[in-house]
Amino acid sequence: MEYEAVIGLEVHVQIKAESKIFTRCRAGFGYEPNTLVDPVIMGLPGALPVMNKKALDGIIKAGLALNCRIPEVCKWDRKNYFYPDSPNNYQITQYDQPICEGGLVEIELSSDSRASMGEHKRIQLTRIHLENDVGKLNHFSEDSLVDYNRAGTSLMEIVTEPDMHSGEEAFALLTAVRQIMVYCGISDCDMEKGQMRADANISVRPVGQKELGSKIELKNLNSITGVKNGIEYEIKRQTRELKKGNTIVQATWRWDAEQGRTESMREKEDAHDYRYLPDPDLMPVRVDEEWKNRIQSEIPELPFDKQRRFFEEYDLPYTITSVLVPDRDLSDYFEAAAKQSPKMAQAIGNYVTNDLLRELSEAGQSLADCKVTAEHLLSLVSTVDKGTITKQIGKDVFLEMFKSGELADAVIERKGLKSDFDDDQVKAWCQEAIDENSKSAENFKSGNEKALNALLGPVMKKSRGKANPQTVNKLLRELIR
Amino acid sequence: MSEELYYKSARELSGLLKAGEVSAVELTQSIIGRTKAVEERVGAFNSYDEGDAVSQAEASDQRRAAGETVGALDGIPVGIKDVLAVKDQPLTCSSKMLENFISPYDATCIQKLKQSGAVLWGRLNMDEFAMGSSTENSATHPTSNPWNLNCVPGGSSGGSAAAVAAGEAVLTLGSDTGGSIRQPASYCGVVGLKPTYGRVSRFGLAAFASSLDQVGPMARSVEDAALLLQAISGYDLRDSTSFRAEVPDFSKSFESLKGKKWKLGLPKEYFEKALDSAAMEPVQQAIDFYRELGCEIKEVSLPHTEYAVAVYYIIATAEASSNLARYDGIRYTHRAENFDRKDSVDVYNQSRAEGFGEEVKRRIILGTYALSSGYYDAYFLKAQKARTLIRQDFEKAYEEVDALLTPTSPSPAFEKGAKMEDPLSMYLSDIYTISANLAGIPGLSLPCGYSGGMPVGLQILGKPFREEEMLAIGQVFEDAHDFKNQHPEL
């Protein structure tokens, strides 16, 4: 019998904000333990939560970017459970009236080759709601200690429908969500800093069966590849069990990335009764059209829309868009140059995705530190396009520009790199090359196109690389025939 | 009338301070002296710090000398129920759970009191976490009723009521979730006011039931209660449920309402129940007083009254079960010395078993049950719906009348121990006060006579955010009687 997996994800994303969700207390990562706290965060007697409007802006933005409905009214509920990382022993969340309902996320699956675009799909969302993050437990040999710095950070939970069927699709969903969050400035989604976390609900059923199989909730998927590997492992495990005739018991499991396997955490019988109740300390929130419109106007063009437009407006190959599009700053940089000269877009795209990225990474810099502005890059590409310098020299000029911040013209001038020979001089070098490599010349004459390269090289050498290869090519052909 | 300083009204004392006839330090010393003299018998306080009070009083005198007096309460000692956070002072909620807790911050109403120049005086005893009607549920000690030391002062703000009655404070703050200001006020023969829900910030009030809790003043006169209410009222950014509106000048506006002929309602459901008839007599006389004054007295109906106690004990305990979850033995509360370190929940079990008293445990269990899956719809949700009906009862009644007159409690103060074994009869002592919390409306209790030597309270229930009307109605009665000058013999 053939089996198929059905996967739903619960993705937690921390909303980037100066302060925490229910108090003005500062939010951040990497501070001394228990320094980002106040009476509200510590759950002291008498402390009360007050909604942070920035967090609401963030989740409304996320909801609109992920095609959710934003109902007029949402409310706050307490989810009651005892755990030391939760100072109040309840989490403030949204139970039956979340701020975002439904939603659709476009994902791109990987293809067989890096050069071609993968299949695009749409994954349905159930809802997105807002809640407070909890603190962090640190386990030592004798004791466990709690750090409440993270507690109270604005956290949204994106819940998908059971709409995915492989680790690959889950991976693509997370990638798409992360790109959109970063594009919109909602979160940096750094999984290492816990800014994005995912749990997966995984079940397996015989192909053709309508009902879902018993699900396993898989936790501790701490990286995007962890999500992919963990889910794939779990699908295989469940399929193996079913094939053996065993049944899957609904439970919570965890992914052990080091061992590369999943293991059981708790059975369903231990499931909590969260005793949800409307939080009497917080008023329901009304989101009107004006508010939605204001947030809508702050949403930038989203990655896949940009990808489609780059294909259309700049005729870029997938190899370039696939590097540009995931990085909003990089694609903005590209477009600042390409817009002014769309016919040079490919050449610009090549510089950006190859030379620029390579140099940035070698220098350990970010785009913001880069001395070569989009304007400067455009003038370099134009200079190459006009034939003033060769493509190869163009790359060297770029390196100089990157290091010193000089303009292209200045580098060319200083180093005397212009291809400013008259055709007679080049012709003379071509003739010399033919004379010195008569065998290659004859081979070319008798139809071996490749033999021309053996002549091209010496001419370029004679010109110290400055001769325009197209001109040399043309002259060689004329002289041999 | 030459009275001891400690029994003078805040209004009068304010005048004496202003005239320089008395200093804040003298006044505070008088309160301290009185407290030392009677506290052993009354037991109103969990703790007090004389030195701190005197230095606050000195600061007040210095302000006055410099012409920088900040308000009508400058230099007046105000006692604080041990449920409100005062920076660097203990906050115990009369619970073993918080026996060693020192608050690192001020409640908003405390901040406001400090800004008004009041001398914050001591931590007043209460039923543990404000759960109770007799102050016998205190983990420290029971407080006695100054009118009869064998009787309870009521609760949960029993310490606040007793302190005012015994002259151990000029004014006190209490909190009222189901009658916890009004019922002890009536038992101790003082004035107690529960403001409209949202009038006073709850920030810094250790929560019992968040949707019902309000901080309010206790005093020996209506006017003094208005002064203290003025100081603590107002919108607070730190409490989302506080009301965003201007606070009227209560003293002024109720002065201007003095001559008004009110339409006053008598909820028939409150009078047809079996009442202690002796206790009812002063209330009847008060009603007659208003009738003779020319007020229109009208019977009204609050048809859902019979559900109020049941609804209250579901909603209040449900919220409490969640609110009190933070007292867990992990951070700042009592932690059991012995617990199974291998069992991650045992530190909770042992610490909470040791830290909470019987009544608190009873209510946590009740509330946990009411919220459990499978029971939520039958209990909590149904109670929420009934609560709406109760609120609508009042809205309808207020279309016909300006305010309601009722007894505050079915009987005067009972003897200590009389109801400890019977929680249900204890719960019923709040039967007339609970509805106001469910409906969010304001309520005032003021002394209206005696029954068997014990004070009896008249309750005036007002329209939301019209505390000044309630105060005006109360003051007319107070002015025509001498109850505010009647003090227990101690």
Image (cartoon, rainbow, N blue to C red):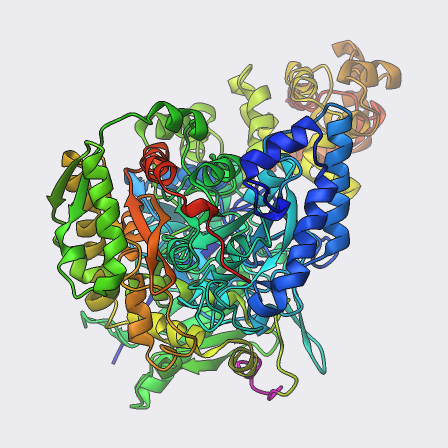
Secondary structure mostly seen in the magenta stretch: loop
Question: From the image, which quarter does the N terminus of chain B lie in?
Answer: top right
Point out the image quarter for the C terminus of chain B.
bottom right
Q: Is residue B110 above or below residue A164?
A: above
Residue drawn 74% across the image and 11% down it: A423
Viewer-side residue, A316 vs B309:
B309
What residue is shown at x 59% (from left), y 61% (from top)? A135
Where residue A362 appears, as percent x and y from the top left, is 77, 43
Q: Position of residue B59 (x, y in %)?
A: 76, 38
B249 and A244: which is toward the camera: B249
Does B123 appear above or below B223? below
Q: Nearer the viewer, residue A8 or A282?
A: A282
Q: Nearer the viewer, residue A432 or B350?
A: B350
Which quadrant of the structure image shows residue B13? top right
Does B265 lie within the magenta span? no
| Whether residue B47 is visible | no
Residue at 75% x, 47% y is: B54
